[in-house]
Each structure stands twice: as C-alpha cells, then as structure tokens.
Image (cartoon, rainbow, N blue to C red):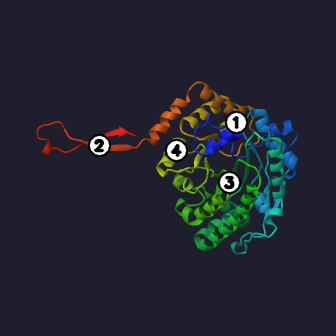
Amino acid sequence: MNLIDNLEDAFKGKEVEKVPAASIVSVALIEGMEKANSGFPESHINAEKMVALGESAHKYAGLESINIPFDLAIEAEAMGCEVDLRDANEHIPEITSSPYFDDLESVEVNDDFLESGRIPVVAEACQIAREKYTEVPLIAGQIGPFTLLGQIVGIEYLMKCLATNPEEVKRGVDKCADAVIEVVKAYNTLDIQGDCMYEPSVAADLLPPEMFDDIVAKPLERVAKAADFNIVLHVCGDTTPILKNSLNLGYNGFSFEDSVNAKHANKVKYELKSNTQLVGNVATDTLFKGDLEGVRQESFKALDRGIDILGSSCCVPPGTPLKAIEAMVKARDEYYEKGLDKTRQINEDNLSWTPDYIDIPLPVANICEMQTLKTYKTI
C-alpha cells in the first residue's frame, strides 16, 4: 500500500485501500526517545533529534506517519515569549513570560517571526524527514490563532476580555492568525502531507459556542485557505456543540476526542455536505494504559462509525507504550482482513440515503375522495 497516496485519498474523501492509521496529532513516546536516543529537550531544539523521535512511532510501531514537532509553544516563543524547555522526557515546553501579558492592544507579529525561536529548526527537520522518508506521510503542526492569543496575553485575561472588549479580542485573534498563516505559508514550501492546527482553547467549556462564529470562524477560515496541503483542525474536549461550526470552515480534516460520538459527527458531516474528513478518536487513556484489547475495540468502533483517518483522540501521552500504537495499526488491518468494513459501508450508506417521494394513488373505488399515499425509494 502506498501510504502517501492512501492518506491523500482519505483526505479527498475517495475510496481507500484501508483507512489510514496515521496519527495527525503529536506522538512523542518515552520508549521511542530511548530507542532513538532522542529525548527532551534535545528533540525540541535539534533537527536531527527531532526527526529521530518523530520517526520512532513509524519505525517501531508501524504508524503510517511521521509527526513533528512535539509542543505548542513554538509560535509564542517566536513572538517573544520566554519558554522553559524543561529536561524531563514526560514534560513539554512551558511558556514562562510574555511581552504581551494582560495587554491585548500591544499584540503584533514581529518582522523576523519566521526566523525566530525554533521555527527554523522545525523547517529543517521537515526537510530532513522528507529526504529520509520519501514514501511515508509527513505531518507537521502548529498552534491555532485563538489559543496562541491566550498563550501570549494569558488565558484568564483573554476570557475576561471576551466579555468586556470583544472587538479587541477579534483584532488580537486576527493578528495571531497572521502569524499562523506565515507558518502555514512556510510549510507550503516543504513537501508535507498534512498539518495539525491545535485549537484547544476554542472548546465549548472555554469559548461559548455562540461566540465561535463571531470570534474565531473567519480567522480559522483564513488559515485553511492559506494552506496548499491537507490541514486538520484539532479541538480538545467535547466538541459536539461546535461540530457544525468546525466542519464548515474549509479544513481537510477535523480531529476530535473520544468524548464525541463519531457516528453523530459523521451524521453532521453528511447533513452539511462537508468535505472535512473525520480524524481520531481512539482514547488517549486507553492507549496510555496499554490496554491492547481496549485499543482494538475502540479502533473497530471508530472505523464502524465513519472515522476517515484513524489515530489518537488527542496528543499521545509520552508514557504510552509503543505496543499500544502498534495495536491500533494491527486492529485497522484486522478490521479489513475479517471483512468488518461491511458494517462501516452499511453505516455510510444509511447516512447518505435520502428519501425520494413517489405519489401512488390508493387502489380503491372512491380514490377521488382519498389522500395520496407517499412511499420511499432509495436513490
């Protein structure tokens, strides 16, 4: 199976040989760090180490993708924030200070943004990975504009400003969208097959769903339009209240957690006639615990319910065993080997079925006094 073509077909909604088992979210496991001799923080700042860790889940567990980078502080750092990379393998970098803290009005994108911080390291890593793996999908990632704004001004302050100064919030989100678009355009020059844009702060428990369209929809649409590759929006938590919003923004994929019923998400997708594919949603908890039978069953369930690209419901916890990732890939294979994809097809057919009404006169003598009977046929 050609992994790149298979993933490209999945993103286009075409028939695939198998649903790709390619994580779109970050996969940086301690076991992979040990095998590749590429732990934190080295793999955050050294392009060769970044690739070694990024390839480990593919190399040692059969995952059908290579994912880099591994943290969400890269854009904030390039905008002038100080970041503590930390030295424990299970801890990701943390923003410790910001020039924009509690100050929405001062938010601007610096002229040397793309040359700042670790952005050049990620670009170099993408080039190395592409040269090394010509037949494996390369998945990059960056933070979304609303979450980036929360990082640099402070999330509590941002939440207050939503109520007191929403117009300034919009301006700040637009400025951060400009920064994200610069990263996206840089990725356009690299040969990547996918990109995950992480927007955890637009979850319904942070941003009220009724404010989604007003505050973040247009900036998110701008980001999607700037991408010449498959771009996926990932939102943490229960995104059921914002499914219609998220599947209507022009993204190639929407990645969501196991708290969302994939069958319902697929139904919404069909109702909207959306071209956004569903990504996920095997529980990170199940993967982290190394519950191999649980991973198998959750993979089957996700495939039955219409997941288009099978992967973790959120960033894979570093302590997750490689065997859990391997179990997910093997479950996908078993699903097809045993012909279980028939259930998936039946479910898809049921969702795409639409009624066509045919007026048939009732076969009675006084038909002129009777109502017409409406029956269905399948089209």
As displayed, is residue 154 above or below residue 93? below
Residue 280 appears left or right of 136: left
Q: Quadrant of the N terminus?
A: top right
Quarter occupied by residue 300: top right
Q: Position of residue 107 (x, y in %)?
A: 72, 71
Comes first in the chain, label 1 or label 3:
1
Q: Position of residue 258 (x, y in %)?
A: 60, 42
What secondary structure is found at the residue carrying circle 4? helix
Q: Nearer the viewer, residue 171 or 124?
A: 124
Dot 2: few (<14), some (14–19), or many (≥20) neighbours within 10 Å? few
**Quick check: marks 3 and 2 in contact, CB under 8 Å?**
no
At a point 68% along the width and 45% down the height, the residue shown is 24
Comes first in the chain, label 1 or label 4:
1
Residue 2, numbered label? 1
Amino acid residing under circle 4: Asn
Comes first in the chain, label 1 or label 2:
1
